[in-house]
Image: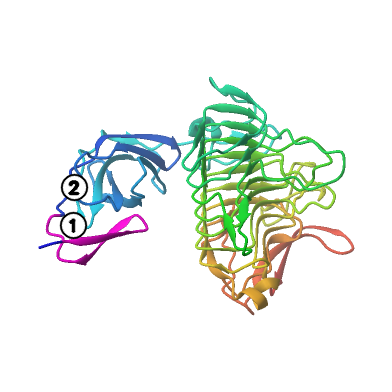
Amino acid sequence: MTVVRKRTNGQWQVLSGDHSNVIASDAPTGVSVTTPTNGVARVVWTPPVFTGNGDILKFVIEATVNGGGLAKTVQANPEDTSTLVTGLIGGTSYTFRVAVINSFGTGVFSSATAPLAMATAGAYVLPNGLIIPSGWINPATAGIFGANMDYGDLTVHEGSIVTTSHGQVIEDLDIHGNIEIKHNNVIVRHCRIRSMQTSSVITGGEGVVDGNKSIVDGLGNRTWLANNLLVEYCEVIGTDDPEINDQSGITSGGSTGITARFNVLHGMSDAITLNDNATVSSNLVYDIKVADGSHADCFQITDGDSTLVEDNVFMCHTPTGAPVTGGDGVQRVDKINGLGNAAIQIGAQTGTLTNLTINHNYLSGGYYTINSNNSGEGANGQITGAYTNNVFSGHFKYGPVGNYGSGMTFNNSNIWEATRVTNTWSGPGDTIEKYYHLTASAQVNGTVSTTTP
């Protein structure tokens, strides 16, 4: 029997005949694992030579507690040779194995790795004096470049880099300039990127790692050029030019499928600004640049569906004096002039904003630590998604949350850092505890106010 197959989006589909010639794939080889930070494993493998006469559709990775049962299963794309497994328990030992999924199904699993204990990280003190609590992203143990840290043997590159091909890999460089992403499937890995933008007038700066690039054909159709960008294990530093007051660290424009993970970003007004199908995981943002006319946020999205924001530390303020501890045990900043706009800013101003997952982030600072601008819902539809398992510090002006898209949920898994008390908002018309720092007439520390968003 003749088998006719068609390749669509990287996958083979049978159009006629059967696919009895497709059998299970051999096992991947060379599987190894490291733990770059608390609760995270990086699994690396080599694809098998024989894939069962069928294309690799996915890799499947299993994490098993040493001496126990299956703990977590994740999948990776067919072109990947490594992936991150998050949500593991610090101090617990795990083994890992990998298999191929083709049209036959799941193939033979590799041999399990030797048991590996997940890293446990202590508190990390940033150069500006802020403390990242134990259990969150720690540059010293995560293999990320951070301020005042050893950068290793990097090759210095003077000037900006403009990508030249799809799939280009930029790694192990100390870049004195920006990166312009004009191609798909680019990887930026293990680099220190220091923006050298200068300006003689007050103007907005582009992204340091800038995926905001597109082409327009003769009919006016726009094609974005930075789809499936991966930026990992990098330090991204904004320009020190005081005239540039609106600069992003990693930005995507209208590009989709961008992943930013295990990066340290500081010195810009909008650190991470992404779009559809983005993954923002285990990043540290601090020293937000708050300048006149600047809308300073650690993470911002105004058009994007199915985006995941998880395991990040977003510090949207700089110390401006000793914090004040109220009677409820929550610390609040003694002054307000070190605050950016928000640790997380979302709004459907430029397009649809649906299926957002904002889970397990350490959120600190900001006028509203989370600010959801729902003004665009009338034109672009209901904002939908959920805030879960986030931890709020006591640094803020008006409160840890403000405004909501009508389809966003905020449940009692979100807690205060100091008291571990839940901060609950279940929907429009419900109430949420807001710990106000200032009123219109006077400073009020430790005052609890109940407000309907």
Where in the figure is residue 250, as x and y percent of width and height?
62, 45
| Residue 444 placement: quadrant | bottom right
Mark-to-mark CA distance, 1 and 2: 8 Å
Residue receiving disc 2 = 25
How many callouts does the rendering have?
2
Could you tell me which quadrant the N terminus lies in? bottom left
Which of 143 and 130 lies nearest the eye of the viewer? 143
Mark 1 closeness class: few <14, some 14–19, many ≥20 residues within 10 Å: some
Residue 192 is drawn in which quadrant?
A: top right
Position of residue 40 relative to residue 125, above or below, is below
Q: Which quadrant would the C terminus be assigned to in this image?
A: bottom right
- The residue sitting at 16% across, 61% down in the picture is 3
Residue at the front extreme? Answer: 218
Residue closest to the eye, 290 or 218: 218
Task: Looking at the image, tell me whether mark 1 or mark 2 is earlier in sequence order.
Answer: 2
Q: List the residue tagged with mark 1.
A: 104
Q: Position of residue 396 (x, y in %)?
A: 72, 54
Q: Is residue 290 above or below residue 146?
A: below
> What x and y, as percent, mark residue 284?
59, 42
- Whether residues under marks 1 and 2 lie with C-beta atoms below 8 angstroms apart, the answer is yes
Q: Is residue 295 left or right of residue 388?
A: right
Q: How is the image coloured?
A: rainbow
Element assignment for label 1? loop
Q: Amino acid at mark 1?
A: Phe
Residue placed furthest toward the right? 441
Tell me the kind of residue under disc 2.
Ser
Residue occupying the point 32% across, 51% down: 72
Q: Which residues are magenta?
A: 3-21
Residue 305 image point, x, y percent? 53, 64
Q: Is residue 18 magenta?
A: yes
Q: Is residue 242 left or right of residue 267?
A: right
